[in-house]
Image: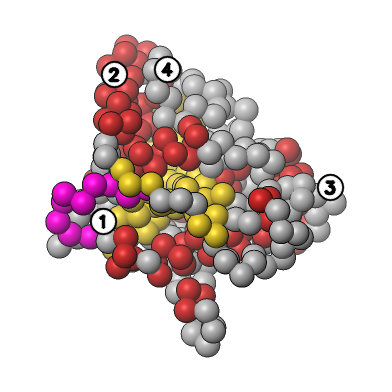
């Protein structure tokens, strides 16, 4: 039987305990042996739709690999930092997340994707899809299980992650680049205070403007309102918000209800408070600081943090 669970969390009496658990997990993440690579170009010969040859025109992926003292293949997660499609929070929604994943024996891959206002859709989606394919293409080298490659996204990065999870393909068999022959479908998604919809009152207008410009076509708005693109092939998903988040939690509710309707395993946590942009919430006495503990349990239940024999 599918497990579909929503928790609206009002736990003032337990804030201290859950914060302690989260801080302990985050402290381990800071200490875990990792092997970060140098960032590498997604397209060494130049990205599609590139408008120049500067740093802003070159999307990259940086691998953070846990120590190799556990036998078996590990899961991997492409990390999409937030920043309203205008900047990237590469530390607390990038490197720190990779190290937190490493603490669970999971490889993390921090994506530097192209940004508005220089770039609009579909450049960002192409970058994220390429990152998914690239990780699978290097699975043997990085000791990754290619069937356990997921995505985590924060804020606007959550919109990008949910776009990858609802706009994917199996790869192009006749492609000359072998990376393009691989699937870009995530095997699971973790969406942390994500932007989801591009229509209606819940829209985060700043992210929409940076991604799509001032006058997006109605059909594009519909296509990138990802709650409207969920079907039975959408990956299992964990969604996290705080009730006082300026990115309206209705974004996540709409996505969760679409997942439930499609019978996709889903879990939604809406905490009483926490605001927005807290990352791992290290050292923060807010209810939302509980999310890394919940996410760790979710990853264990779905077999992501356990090595594949």
- Crowd class of label 3 (few under 14; some 14 to 19; many from 20; radius 10 Å): few
Q: Report whether residue 15 is seen.
A: yes
Answer above or below: position of 49 versus 245.
below
For the point 30% across and 55% down, the residue is: 75
User: Which segment is the magenta one?
Assistant: 64-74
For the point 53% across and 38% down, the residue is: 90
Query: As drawn, is 300 to the left or to the right of 120?
Result: left
Residue lying furthest bottom? 174
- C-beta proximity under 8 Å, tags 2 and 1: no
What is the distance, in whole Å, between disc 1 and disc 4 at their CAs? 30 Å
Residue 62, given in percent of the width and then of the height, sits at: 46, 51
Query: As drawn, is 77 to the left or to the right of 209?
Result: left
For the point 51% across and 75% down, the residue is: 180
- Report helix, strand or loop for mark 3: loop
- Residue corresponding to mark 3: 214
- Residue corresponding to mark 4: 284
Residue 276, given in percent of the width and then of the height, sits at: 55, 27
- Residue corresponding to mark 2: 20
- Residue corresponding to mark 1: 74
**Viewer-side label of 3, 1:** 1
């Amino acid at each position: 039987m599918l497990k579909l669970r929503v928790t609206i969390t009002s736990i003032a009496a337990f804030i201290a305990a859950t914060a302690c658990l989260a801080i302990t997990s985050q402290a381990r993440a800071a200490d875990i042996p990792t092997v970060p690579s140098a960032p590498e170009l997604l397209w060494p010969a130049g990205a599609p739709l590139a408008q120049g040859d500067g740093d802003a025109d070159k999307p990259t992926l940086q691998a953070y690999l846990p120590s190799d003292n556990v036998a078996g293949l590990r899961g991997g997660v492409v990390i999409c930092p937030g920043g309203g499609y205008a900047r990237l929070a590469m530390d607390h929604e990038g490197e720190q997340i990779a190290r937190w994943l490493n603490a669970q024996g999971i490889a993390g891959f921090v994506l530097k994707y192209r940004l508005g206002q220089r770039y609009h859709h579909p450049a960002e989606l192409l970058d994220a899809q390429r990152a998914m394919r690239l990780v699978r293409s290097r699975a043997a080298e990085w000791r990754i299980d290619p069937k356990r490659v997921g995505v985590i996204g924060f804020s606007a990065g959550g919109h990008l992650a949910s776009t990858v999870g609802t706009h994917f393909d199996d790869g192009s068999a006749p492609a000359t680049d072998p990376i393009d022959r691989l699937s870009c479908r995530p095997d699971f998604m973790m969406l942390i205070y994500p932007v989801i919809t591009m229509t209606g009152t819940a829209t985060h207008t700043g992210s929409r403007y940076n991604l799509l410009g001032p006058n997006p076509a109605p059909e594009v708005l519909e296509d990138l309102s990802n709650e409207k693109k969920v079907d039975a092939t959408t990956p299992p998903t964990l969604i996290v918000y705080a009730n006082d988040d300026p990115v309206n939690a209705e974004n996540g509710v709409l996505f969760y209800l679409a997942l439930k309707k499609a019978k996709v395993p889903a879990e939604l946590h809406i905490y009483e408070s926490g605001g927005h942009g807290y990352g791992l919430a290290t050292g923060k006495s807010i209810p939302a600081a509980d999310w890394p503990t919940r996410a760790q349990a979710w990853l264990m239940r779905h077999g992501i943090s356990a090595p594949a024999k």
